[in-house]
Image (tube, rainbow, N blue to C red):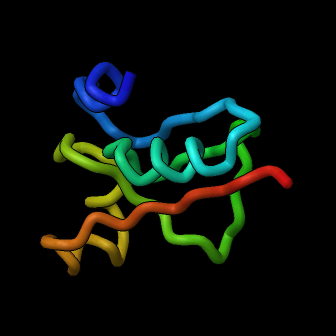
Amino acid sequence: MIERGNRTFYGLAAAVWTKDISKAIKLSNALRAGTVWVNCFDVFDASAPFGGFRCPASAANWGSMRLQLYTEVKTVTVKT
């Protein structure tokens, strides 16, 4: 499952649906996506960093995150 999710060209966002929080954390860490939602989708917080992995046209290259070329920022949102 992780390999399939990481094969995408963009790597902007992913969602994990599970009742097992340990599994959710493991998958969130392994997925190469800038935003990972756990048991929710399309939830944003204006104060959370936004970025992506891989694709040069991704949103990670459009803002202040561009200055940190060697950093891959990830935001994980968990519905409790």
Q: Position of residue 39 (x, y in %)?
A: 74, 38
- Placement of 18 over or under 27, stated as above or below: above
Instruction: Single out the residue that lies furthest toward the right.
Output: 80
State the image coordinates of residue 67 (x, y, percent, origin top left): 21, 80
Residue 51 rendering spot, x and y as whole percentages: 39, 58
Quarter-wise, where is residue 20 in the image? top right
Relative to 62, residue 69 above or below: below
**Left or right: where does residue 11 sit relative to residue 20?**
left
Of the pair 69 and 7, the residue shown nearer to us? 7
Q: Is residue 65 left or right of residue 24?
A: left
Q: Residue at x 35, y 77 (%)?
A: 64
Q: Nearer the viewer, residue 59 or 76?
A: 76
Relative placement, left or right, of 14 versus 60 is right
Tell me which residue sits at (54%, 52%) in the image. 25
Above-or-below relation of 38 to 34: above
Q: Quadrant of the N terminus?
A: top left
Quarter residue 65 falls in: bottom left
Q: How many marks?
A: 0
Considering only vertical position in the picture, is 52 above or below 1?
Answer: below
Q: Which quarter of the rendered picture does the C terminus lie within?
A: bottom right
* Residue at image coords 17%, 46%: 56
Q: Can you tell which quarter of the image residue 31 is in?
A: top left
What residue is shown at x 59% (from left), y 44% (from top)? 24
- Provide residue 8's location: percent of width, then percent of height: 28, 25
